[in-house]
């Protein structure tokens, strides 16, 4: 029995190490939506969005990762988000013509990145089980009673049975504004997207973060697309 418990302890410890190991995160903003239900017959030039998202959105949480941390991004977030929006609008026919540069556009789109957060962090249960495991293993040195070993292993063993060890959260808010060539504001479009998923140690939560963040990004842009198609100023 004691041997079995020791093996279980070691297995839990190994699982914990694997889960806590450093995974290099790489993230590129991307919109994944279907073809627009109709095309607005206008030529649009899009200016680079202004990033006013909170600084803490880009900070790595303790024991976790942030999709928008500068080390995870290939370039500037504002440029990447702007290009992703233009690519979706052009590829899926939201406007008849749209680009970052046009000589004689009908309208101008400007905007702000109000929030762009995608984070993966350990759950409270994981931290609690890790502390219990560490304290329990230290106590075994002074008291080899099997019951102490059981108390040390049980919380960590819960992770082996699928109790969520990590949580991925994405929260996106984008605002676009439509201007005429004289610089007059005509319309404002706002989109928000959220994802929240708990994951076990058998899922690589860090590697899943980019796709979950882009899913929330796509939700926000889908809302903006619908507002554009419903805007009487463009009909």
Image (cartoon, rainbow, N blue to C red):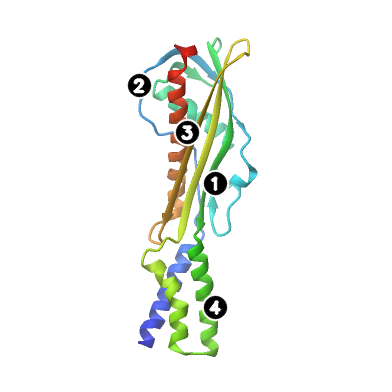
Res. 30 in view: no
Instruction: Establish if 121 lies above or below 1.
Output: above
Q: CA distance from mark 4 to mark 3?
A: 45 Å
Indicate which disc, 1 or 3, sits on the residue closer to the N terminus: 1
Indicate which disc, 4 or 3, sits on the residue closer to the N terminus: 4
Indicate which disc, 2 or 3, sits on the residue closer to the N terminus: 2
Res. 6 in view: yes
Does dot 2 land on a helix, a strand or a loop?
Answer: loop
Instruction: For the residues labelled 2 and 3, say whether their Cβ atoms are less than 8 Å apart.
Output: no
Does dot 1 land on a helix, a strand or a loop?
Answer: loop
Give residue 48's position: percent from left, percent from top: 59, 27
Mark 4 vs mark 1: in front = 4
Residue labelled with disc 3: 220
Indicate which disc, 2 or 4, sits on the residue closer to the N terminus: 2
Q: Residue, x 45% and y 83% (percent of image)?
A: 149
Give residue 128's position: percent from left, percent from top: 51, 68
- Of residue 15 and residue 231, the one placed in the foreground of this image is 231
The label on residue 72 is: 1
């Amino acid at each position: 029995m004691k041997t079995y418990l020791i093996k279980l302890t070691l297995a839990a410890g190994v699982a914990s190490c694997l889960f806590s190991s450093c995974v290099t995160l790489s993230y590129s903003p991307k919109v994944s939506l279907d073809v627009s239900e109709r095309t607005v017959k206008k030529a649009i030039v899009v200016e680079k969005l202004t990033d006013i998202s909170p600084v803490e959105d880009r900070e790595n949480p303790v024991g976790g990762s942030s999709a928008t941390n500068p080390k995870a991004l290939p370039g500037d977030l504002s440029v990447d988000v702007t290009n992703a929006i233009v690519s979706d609008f052009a590829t899926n026919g939201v406007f008849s013509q749209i680009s970052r540069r046009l000589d004689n556009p009908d309208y101008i789109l400007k905007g702000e990145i109000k929030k762009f957060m995608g984070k993966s962090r350990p759950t409270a249960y994981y931290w609690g089980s890790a502390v219990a495991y560490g304290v329990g293993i230290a106590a075994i040195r002074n008291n080899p009673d099997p019951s102490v070993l059981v108390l040390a292993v049980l919380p960590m063993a819960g992770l082996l049975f699928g109790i969520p060890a990590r949580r991925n959260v994405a929260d996106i808010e984008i605002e676009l504004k439509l201007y005429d060539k004289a610089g007059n504001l005509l319309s404002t479009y706002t989109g928000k997207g959220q994802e929240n998923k708990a994951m076990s140690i058998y899922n690589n939560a860090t590697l899943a973060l980019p796709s979950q963040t882009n899913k929330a990004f796509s939700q926000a842009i889908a809302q903006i697309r619908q507002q554009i198609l419903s805007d009487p100023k463009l009909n």
